[in-house]
Image (cartoon, grey):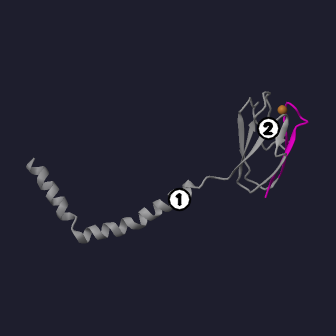
């Protein structure tokens, strides 16, 4: 017990006001950096949604910025898929309320269709 008290007293001495200021100055930028990082991390990446309703992709044509994630959600009672003509992406069969997300990292025009009902088509334009 005595040793513990001594250790606490020593620690208190080591943390003299001058040292406390130095510690605060050193921690300041670190805390600032952490706060800045938190603010950046809190920014949600851009997401856009394409709904599948009644055998139609809605919106049928969507323009997004590079880096946008597009989420395709099936609202039909029938399974659909989302398949890029140029094979950039291909979803599994989406049951009711299932979704498929793809992040468009490169600019371009992406024509896609439903693999089960090829007359269902849509287009994502990435700029
Ligand atoms: Cu379909």
- Relative to 38, does residue 112 appear above or below in the rendering? above
How far apart in space, not on screen, are marks 1 and 2 (Cα)?
34 Å
Q: Dot 1: few (<14), some (14–19), or many (≥20) neighbours within 10 Å?
A: few
Q: Nearer the viewer, residue 99 or 88?
A: 99
- Region rendered in magenta: 109-127
Kindly identify which residue carries mark 1.
39
Q: Position of residue 91 (x, y in %)?
A: 76, 36
* Residue most extreme to the left: 2
Please indicate whether residue 11 sits to the left or right of residue 74 in the image: left
Quadrant for ligand 1 reads: top right
Q: Reply yes or no: does residue 111 show up in magenta.
A: yes
Q: Which residue is located at x 53 percent, y 59 percent?
A: 39
* Residue most extreme to the right: 119
Quarter of the image where one finds residue 49:
top right
Q: Earlier in the sequence, mark 1 or mark 2?
A: 1
Please indicate whether residue 2 sits to the left or right of residue 84 in the image: left
Label 1 with label 2: CB-CB less than 8 Å:
no
Please indicate whether residue 123 sits to the left or right of residue 96 in the image: right
Q: How many marks?
A: 2
* Residue most extreme to the bottom: 18
- Relative to 38, does residue 123 appear above or below in the rendering? above
Q: Nearer the viewer, residue 53 or 88?
A: 53
Q: Is mark 2 within 8 Å of ligand 1?
A: yes
Q: What element does badge 2 sit on?
A: strand
Q: Reply yes or no: does residue 121 show up in magenta.
A: yes
- Relative to 7, does residue 94 appear above or below in the rendering? above
Q: What element does badge 1 sit on?
A: helix
Q: Which residue is located at x 88 percent, y 37 percent?
A: 120
Kindly identify which residue carries mark 2.
52
Q: Which residue is located at x 8 percent, y 50 percent?
A: 2
- Relative to 39, does residue 76 appear above or below in the rendering? above
């Amino acid at each position: 017990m005595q040793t513990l008290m001594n250790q606490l007293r020593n620690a208190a001495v080591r943390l003299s006001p001058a040292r406390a200021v130095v510690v605060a100055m050193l921690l300041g930028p670190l805390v600032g950096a952490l706060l800045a990082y938190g603010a950046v991390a809190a920014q949600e990446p851009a997401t856009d949604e394409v709904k599948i309703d009644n055998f139609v992709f809605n919106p049928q044509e969507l323009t997004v910025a590079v880096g946008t994630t597009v989420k395709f959600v099936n609202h039909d009672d029938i399974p659909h898929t989302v398949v890029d003509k140029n094979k950039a992406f291909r979803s599994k069969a989406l049951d009711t309320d299932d979704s498929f997300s793809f992040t468009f990292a490169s600019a371009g025009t992406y024509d896609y269709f439903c693999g089960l009902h090829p007359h269902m088509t849509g287009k994502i334009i990435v700029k």
